[in-house]
Amino acid sequence: MSFFKSPAATTQQAAASDDTIIDGGSLKYTAEAGANSSLPTYQEASGAPIEVNSPLGYSAGHVTLIFINISKMVGTGVFSTRADIGLSGLASSVLSGTGSVGLALFYWVIGFAVASSMLSVYLEFSSYFPSRSGSEAVYLEQAYPRPRYFFPTVFAMQTVIFSFSSSNSIVLANYLFRLAEASPSDWQLKGVAVASYTVAVLAVSFSTKWSLHLSNAIGWIKLATLTFIAITGLVVLGGNVSSIQDPTAHFRNAFSGSEGATVYGATNALVSVMFSYSGYENAFNLVNEVKNPTKTLKWSAPVSLLVTGILYMFANIAYFAAASKEEIINSEVNVASLFFENTFGSGGASRALNFLICISAFGNLLAVLIGSSRMLRECGRQGVLPFTKFWTSTRPFGTPLGPYFLKWVLTSLMVIAPPAGDAFNFIVNLGVYPQSMFHFLLAIGLLLIRRQRKRLNIPRTEWHAWSVVVYFAIVANFYLLVAPWYPPTEGANGGNVSFWYGTYVVVGISFIASCGVYYVIYIKVLPRFGNYAFRQTIISGPAGETAHKLVKVPNHELASWDEEHDAAGRLRRRQVAEKVDQPSEA
């Protein structure tokens, strides 16, 4: 028995095809409710079909959604200083870019505001599509339905190519060696990084439910670690630690040094802050695994961001109270270890903290794996990627093994292949810039979705972001797209790589443009020369998986195909009824 088959051979499903198509002029829409929500999902018909019963189950509740976000946001960056263990240490990077403690803390507030505005955008999108997982893959698909398959193709290719977590794996390996008080060679570091990621992949591969439970448990540890640092910082700030002579020194003239900040440094500081908040959207990758998703997400997602933002702020205050600016920027150890050494002395306390940071890094790997696997699976369900079974299947364990395997292969490759230094930093930066571009398009796309729904008289949903918040998100993400072009004061080669500072921006834009060229050739040019056109059909798997598949229909058969199939690719009622009435062959 083949994995996929056409579900259009039953009269029940064919009847649904006639009843749920909404004529929007040049666009056709479907309306269908999943088992996780009483509200229907109205979507443009070229979008991936609704999986009425989630093949991944419904194990994501309030606590899971909170910690799936926190575990992705709180990796290791807030504990770190050194550039060789990640995308530069966030605390020192922000302080170095802004020049003063006061401006650094203000930037953390700005980053929280930008993240909150984008969270509102995601919440409204999720209220429109309560039975679709995959967040951006879905929202861009629906906000920009024309040219047909353009955004699904471009976003799917970008998502697949950048589906690696090499930086997080190397961070974890660094801390494991630091915990063992060993100095690894490059290949020892890479070997441990690959092994660590392999363990993470195995941890999520055999059970969706238990992988979420494991992520929750590590999320509690992360929360406790940051809370302990925050409370200890307040104790230090109150002058109750004898080893720290003047804990309020940085706060008496908090903005001293701000005049030395440059546009390039300030931009890097904001990028670092936004990188630290990356993960507030992770829960939206699991929407179809959540019962009553709009009601659940509208408070669990903001709670995760608010808790993280408050703890980030107190953690930074703790660091500034326990160490000088020079120590934070120039320290050879991570900033959290520096804080513990200055507060408790070297020894057991610092080693205990390194262990907690290892746990935090491993939890980050799990959270990213869980969220991005759903996004990859949704890209596969859109029909624009080959090997639909690979992306969509949840057999045999009820988990997306195909996306997990792809991420393991790419991560292992990106850990082993690039040398440390410039190549590593370049690859990390290259993955960040397209994300800002898609966020910018996403915020604009929300306004387009609103207009579409108003034109079709579709009822307003439970969550509606303030328009001023949406416009703020558009402006903020536009800044993050434009500002990286501004050169550093040291010249064209004065960035965090030894070559031209803007190389990653140009390469990122060129890559997305190349995805567009691929779309034009594959979807437009080749069909014209081959005398065929693409049409979509719906296929299904034994565990309830459903997906679109693009099929090549010869031009002379297009009229009959379109007559037999609706806009979503399902057989119409009349054609199925005729097939059912036909006598079966002996």
Image (cartoon, rainbow, N blue to C red):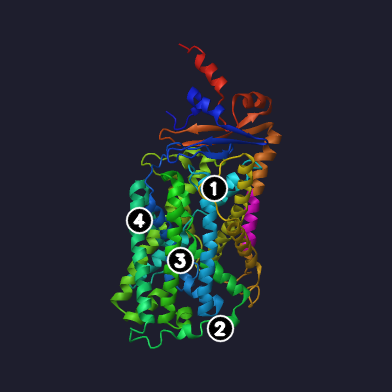
Which circle, 3 or 1, is nearer the viewer?
A: 3
Sequence order check, earlier mark of 1 and 2: 1
Indicate yes or no whether the magenta region holds residue 514: yes
Name the residue tied to disc 3: 309
Sequence order check, earlier mark of 2 and 3: 2
Q: Amino acid at mark 3?
A: Gly
Name the residue tied to disc 1: 137
Say whether residue 514 is left or right of residue 100: right
Indicate the secondary structure of the residue bearing disc 4: helix
Alpha carbon distance from label 4 to label 3: 19 Å
Sequence order check, earlier mark of 3 and 1: 1
Quadrant for the N terminus, please: top left
Indicate the secondary structure of the residue bearing disc 1: helix
Q: Position of residue 363 (x, y in %)?
A: 38, 59
Name the residue tied to disc 2: 257
Which range is magenta? 505-515
